[in-house]
């Protein structure tokens, strides 16, 4: 990588950053955030190339990076500073040379981005640091004064690993992108397999961790998955074949079995794709095709989630490292419950190694528990989908209606499919209501069989149809009459703000219309992510992916000119899509409704832009959320930039429009849809069993599935702005701004 305009000032703290071990998508986003965050906070940042190899070699292996050195890398897969496995670094002599090289550059703070091997290596270096420097002084390789100036090596670790195999973080950098690659592959395989009614056995990565296999099986609607932490009991071959045959009996034309690399049976014998292929032949006479996904999983551009998460982590790493003292314990920066988390690096790495040894020594139950709650939840869901155990029902089965309301959100179909499957298992009759509350008034209600929804897991759009609009007082009677006519005992309302508002209105009328006294669960599905009772809603991850992909393309279209793009995103009065897409795409500016737009702000932005273009910048992206300001529309902002740009740069508007709502749901949205649907049906079943008729909103709060009464909307919602009063993500605006522009006067 080229170096541009680096400045060194005596007395500034010096940070080294390296990527090590297996590469993972999103590592570049982390490196960019470390470099720019470091410069923003007044430090000098050095890249250490090719992992520990560069540290051991020194010379060109360690180079300072400037602000613009990390431009244009956010969207790139792999790692631009290189990664390697270093044999020398495993030896004390290698680490001694590495320590000397760091001290010669004045570096005593290190951000290590890698797997548990790389983090263990970093810890070894930190532990031995004083001894290594003493040896170097004794050998005449280092001045005593230089050693004295750096009494300790301070370390922060970020986990880059596509396997999602680390305690201390709910997601590792790269896992979401790998899941994208796997899900794309499964979707593609499913379509060819369906044409020929074939069975496919697909191997995915994960030597000791089954996250990718489980998550991909849920997201891709695969029939069966085999993972290292939970080897199947004897007789699994029969159960697997039953799962496949059940799928076929529901009208599926394709069958897919996912095998994690490290899958094994209870006796510890490896289960390979060939083992599975042979079992399918013996037990059901199927001639399965095997696909080993291999390095495809590491490839491609990082997902929006990996970019924003790695950016947040890189930024937090710098904050942590600059606040560290020689006495500070090395920290790991991860993501827990949807928030950046800081924990003791080595204790977490050791815990991770314990899990690996639990898997290797057959302590599977312990390994499953140690992997954490959400891992266990995924496993339960997968088991319920693959090996359902229908509940015998005494008496009349309950009838649960599902409808959509509000704008379209990718993942709505996934919710319906999962709800119907789990609802059937619970012994309910599941009813699809077409065309939202209006459809309900007009009796557009039909029973949904498993075969009706079988192919819906991966399908974008909303097969039941969704409708915007508010329930008017005169609709209440026909709605309650339809509930009676169709004997609807419970309702799952899946949608956006309109859906919630309608349910909120309906429950106020229960005294007048007793038919409305049924349990209702609202499930958040809206690309805008502006709903109460949840921090994330189904569809917004897909929309973010669409926006970020469009911004990547827009940027590529402008490589030659000096140009500013004003990109308009959806989101109405909620800036989630605007802010998160700015974070994920590295936009230089963003305008969101929560902050509004002012003329003085625009004037400042133009002067910044002029200064940056004068310095040689070629591109400037401003993301403007559609509801950012009623007067300063996208058109006004673009024209103002054009006028004030005085010919230094030109301006283009890009209104992304409905492409944001289109496409198949992302893996994250499919998994979220499935988790929420499971919990929602469980809640309706519980209420029906207990004779209750509560109206609840299901959601993820601090990463945990939570139910909140619909009545609480009055406190949770700013009705005028139609968004939650508290929005957890707004404070991330600081990161967007700090990483957009180098410090100093505009
Ligand atoms: P990952 O970080 O992806 O787990 P590795 O286990 O291959 O990948 O580790 C990457 C590099 O980290 C190794 O090539 C080696 O240089 C260094 N490393 C790993 N484990 C240790 C250790 N126990 N002591 C010193 N260095 C280590």
Image: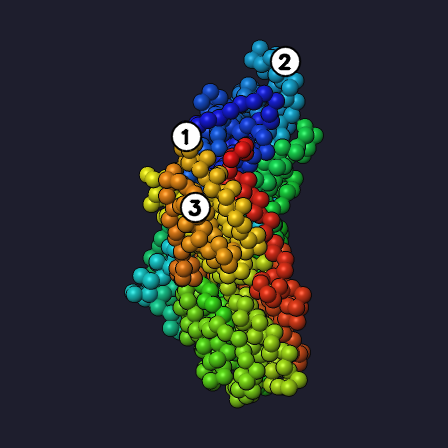
* Mark whose residue sits in front, 1 or 3: 3
Q: Quadrant of residue 11?
A: top right
Mark 1, secondary structure of its residue: loop
Indicate which disc, 1 or 3, sits on the residue closer to the N terminus: 1
- In the rendered image, the vertical position of residue 492 relative to residue 7, given as above or below: below
Q: Position of residue 88 (x, y in %)?
A: 49, 25
* Mark whose residue sits in front, 2 or 1: 1
Q: Position of residue 309 (x, y in %)?
A: 53, 47
| Residue found at x 53% / y 29% | 45
Please give left or right for residue 361 compared with residue 214 in the image: right
Residue 1 numbered tag: 1
Q: Nearer the viewer, residue 513 or 380?
A: 513
Q: Which residue is mark 2?
A: 144
Q: Quadrant of residue 715?
A: bottom right
- In the rendered image, the vertical position of residue 255 relative to residue 450, given as above or below: above
Label 2: how many residues lie within 10 Å, few (<14), some (14-19) or many (20+)? some
Q: Which residue is mark 3?
A: 641
| Tags 1 and 3 touching, CB below 8 Å | no
Indicate which disc, 2 or 3, sits on the residue closer to the N terminus: 2
Q: CA distance from mark 2 to mark 3?
A: 56 Å
């Amino acid at each position: 990588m080229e170096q541009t305009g680096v400045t060194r000032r005596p007395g500034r703290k010096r940070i080294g950053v390296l990527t090590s071990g297996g590469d993972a998508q999103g590592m570049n986003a982390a490196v960019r955030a470390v470099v720019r965050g470091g410069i923003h906070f007044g430090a000098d940042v050095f890249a250490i190339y090719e992992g520990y190899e560069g540290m051991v070699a020194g010379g060109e292996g360690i180079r300072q990076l400037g602000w613009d050195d990390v431009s244009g890398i956010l969207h790139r897969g792999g790692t631009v500073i290189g990664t390697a496995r270093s044999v020398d670094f495993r030896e004390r002599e290698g680490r001694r040379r590495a320590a000397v090289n760091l001290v010669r550059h004045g570096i005593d703070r290190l951000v290590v981005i890698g797997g548990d091997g790389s983090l263990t290596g970093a810890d070894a270096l930190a532990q031995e640091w004083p001894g290594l420097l003493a040896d170097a002084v004794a050998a005449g390789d280092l001045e005593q004064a230089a050693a004295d100036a750096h009494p300790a090596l301070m370390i922060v670790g970020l986990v880059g690993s596509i396997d999602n195999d680390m305690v201390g973080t709910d997601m590792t950098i790269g896992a979401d992108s790998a899941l994208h690659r796997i899900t794309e592959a499964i979707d593609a395989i499913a379509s060819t397999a369906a044409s020929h009614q074939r069975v496919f056995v697909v191997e995915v990565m994960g030597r000791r961790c089954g996250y990718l296999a489980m998550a991909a099986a849920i997201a891709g609607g695969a029939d069966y998955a085999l993972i290292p932490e939970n080897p199947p009991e004897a007789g699994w071959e029969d159960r697997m074949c039953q799962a496949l045959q059940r799928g076929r009996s529901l009208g599926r034309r394709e069958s897919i079995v996912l095998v994690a690399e490290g899958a094994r049976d209870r006796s510890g014998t490896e289960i390979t794709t060939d083992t599975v292929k042979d079992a399918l032949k013996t037990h059901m006479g199927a001639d399965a095709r095997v696909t080993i996904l291999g390095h495809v999983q590491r490839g491609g551009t990082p997902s929006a989630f990996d970019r924003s998460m790695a950016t947040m982590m890189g930024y937090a790493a710098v904050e942590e490292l600059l606040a560290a003292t020689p006495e500070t314990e090395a920290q790991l920066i991860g993501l827990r419950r949807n928030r950046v988390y800081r924990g003791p690096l080595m204790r977490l790495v050791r815990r991770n190694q314990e899990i690996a040894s639990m898997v290797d020594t057959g302590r599977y139950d312990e390994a499953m528990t140690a992997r954490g709650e959400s891992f266990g939840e995924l496993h339960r869901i997968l088991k319920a989908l693959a090996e359902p155990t229908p509940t015998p029902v005494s008496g009349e089965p309950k009838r649960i209606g599902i409808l959509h309301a509000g704008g379209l959100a990718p993942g709505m179909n996934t919710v319906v499919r999962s709800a119907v499957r789990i609802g059937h298992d619970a012994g309910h009759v599941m009813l699809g209501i077409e065309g939202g509350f209006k459809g309900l008034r007009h009796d557009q209600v039909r029973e949904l069989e498993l075969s009706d929804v079988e192919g819906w897991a991966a399908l974008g759009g909303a097969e039941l149809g969704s409708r915007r609009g508010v329930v008017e007082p005169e609709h209440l009677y026909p709605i309650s009459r339809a509930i009676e006519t169709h004997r609807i005992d419970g309702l799952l309302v899946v949608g956006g703000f309109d859906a919630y508002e309608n349910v909120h209105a309906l429950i106020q009328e229960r005294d007048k219309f007793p038919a409305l006294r049924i349990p209702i669960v609202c499930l958040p599905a809206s690309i805008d992510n502006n709903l109460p009772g949840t921090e994330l809603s189904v569809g917004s991850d897909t929309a973010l992916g669409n926006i970020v992909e469009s911004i990547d393309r827009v940027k590529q279209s402008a490589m030659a000119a000096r140009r500013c793009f004003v990109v308009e995103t959806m989101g109405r009065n909620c800036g989630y899509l605007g802010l998160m897409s700015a974070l994920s795409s590295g936009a230089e500016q963003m305008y969101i409704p929560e902050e509004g737009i002012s003329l003085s702000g625009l004037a400042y932005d133009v002067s910044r832009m002029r200064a940056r273009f004068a310095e040689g910048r070629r591109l400037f992206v401003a993301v403007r959320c559609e509801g950012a300001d009623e007067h300063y529309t996208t058109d006004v902002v673009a024209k103002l930039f054009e006028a004030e740009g005085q010919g230094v740069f030109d301006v283009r508007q890009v209104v992304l429009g409905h492409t944001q709502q289109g496409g198949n749901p992302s893996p994250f949205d499919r998994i979220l849809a499935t988790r929420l649907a499971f919990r929602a049906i469980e809640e309706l079943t519980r209420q029906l069993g207990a004779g209750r008729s509560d109206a609840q909103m299901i959601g993820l709060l601090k990463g945990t599935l939570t139910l909140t009464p619909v009545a609480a909307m009055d406190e949770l919602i700013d009705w005028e702005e139609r968004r939650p009063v508290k929005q957890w993500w707004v404070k991330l605006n600081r990161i967007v701004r700090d990483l957009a522009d180098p410090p100093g006067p505009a």
